[in-house]
Amino acid sequence: MIKKIISSAAIFFVLVFCQASPIDNRDSHPLIIDTDCALDDMRAISMLLSCPGISIQGVIVTEGALLPEEGAKKVKSLLHEFAMDTIPVICGRFTGKPGPAWRDFNRSIVWGTLQDDGKPFTDAIAWLQNLLEVSSDEITYICLGPLSTLAAALSNHNNLDSKIYRVIWYNESIMPASGFNYFFDKPAADSLLQMKIRIDLISTLEKKDAFFDASVYEFSGNFSTGLSRILSTTGGQSAIRKKQYEHHLRIADELAAVYYTNAELFDMTTLHPEVHIRYNKEYDLQSVKEVFTDMIMGTYKKSNTIVFSAFPDKPGMYTYDVRKILDSAIARYGPEEWKACVMTDEFHGHLGVFSIVGAKMGIKARELFGVGPDLLKVTTYAGTRPPYSCLNDGIQVSTGATIGQGLITMADVEKTRPEAIFNYGGRSYRLTLKDEYLAIVNRDIEEGILKFGLLDDGYWKMIRRSALKYWLEWDRDVIFKVEEIKIIN
């Protein structure tokens, strides 16, 4: 009976005092890749390089399948093939441990023209410590090899672990812990697993059909994308062809890349009582292969959409008046604002003036902080009565700061106005629709009421035309007064 009461109390505490967040496959944090340069690692890196919109801060080469410096040269060659030479390549420390049996195989693979400027590589531990110290953002860390570098960088630096949003680590198993990436540096892995950093462990689960076989390489030869060229070229090398015929080329570390881009394909669970450790107990292999195919063809889009694989962008999918502004609006303000305005209108129930202003305001606020959706906290001064309150719907849709997530608050003010304060990471910005634009809106609304009255459909048609005009002509970089608010502790 006592155990039951304690259990109920614990559940009550979680429900009442802990703010839950949705599982989010839209990771917008800066990315660091850590690799030991095995074949599957390099394919995984190639997949991430082929995805637009991923902010890779650097590639760390940790000892494992290859020695750090020889692996770093291969990574630089690969980056050059993708015209991404500006991404830093950093070397982990040489340990002198015996290499795996497949080291010579990985040495034999050519990933591009050797890029060697003769300069010594930067020490990965010092580089990582410095990056974490100065970064204003949390980091997502994808580790495709041993955890040596990360564990060493965080050792005796207690504050740095707070800069890690999560670690995505490919390893064969966590229950029990096993696999090359674990055993090559077991002390490092054990020390990191004992920290309270979130670690998402991804495994192939030894699925019998999880092959990266000859058909994938042959398929790649039909296209001219960066990824297809890399796969087609490497697939034609004798060492890899031999492995293909022996059925040794299985999908492995590529799963970590797919988990980063498409977490919804993986069924994750936590390792109780260490709930910061998560691992996949299942994944959709067929859909994973479809991701490979789309990336090879160049049709893959890493989108912030929840349901769509890509947001509708064909004119025929929109009403006739909206399709007239589609191409111009996207060209001027980008697809993210277009999506926010479209979703706001559907959510709001009609194409409204202040709802469009709210959508543009939310996108502008996200740009000021450099963050994706679901991260900002908002206080709005638009009240709960139209027309100003319509601003709230646009802000919720464009920022993800919804009532349901508890991230938006409506200030109790006597005089409402189209204004909101956005907070993130200890900083705050106040955004207000400038007086000259507010005067235009007020004038148009007044004109509509005088002509038609609020209950006439002529009024709403006029509002729709005005909203479309503002949507296309009002630049979010121009229409708002932006003030950074100093926070006094």
Image: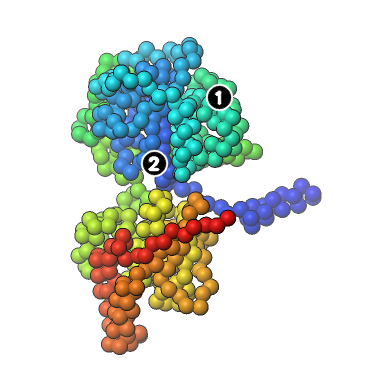
Q: To which quarter of the image does residue 441 belong? A: bottom left
* Residue located beneath label 1 in the image: 188
The residue depicted at 29 percent of the width and 20 percent of the height is 116
Residue positioned 43% across, 73% down in the render: 417
> In the image, residue 480 lies at what x, y percent?
35, 65
Callout 1 environment at 10 Å: few (<14), some (14 to 19), or many (20+)? some
Quarter in which the C terminus is drawn: bottom right
> What mark, if any, has residue 356 been given in the picture?
none
The one of 364 and 395 positioned closer to us in this rendering? 364
Residue 365 percent coordinates (x, y): 40, 58
Camera-side mark, 2 or 1: 1
Secondary structure under the numbered disc 1 in the rendered image: helix
Depth check, front residue: 451 or 246: 451
Q: Is residue 320 above or below residue 274?
A: below
The residue at 57%/32% (across/down) is 157
115 lies above or below 442: above
| Amino acid at the residue labelled 1 | Ala
Q: Is residue 200 visible?
A: no
Q: Against 441, is 72 above or below?
A: above
Question: Mark 2 vs mark 1: which is more N-terminal?
Answer: 1
Left or right? Give the position of 474 relative to 62: left
> Between marks 2 and 1, how big is the CA–CA gap?
27 Å
Count of marks placed on residues = 2
Q: Secondary structure at mark 2?
A: helix
Q: Can you give x and y, in whole percent of width and height, for residue 403 in the image? A: 50, 63
Residue at left 35%, top 36%?
A: 48
Viewer-closest of 80 and 9: 80
* Residue 261 - label: 2
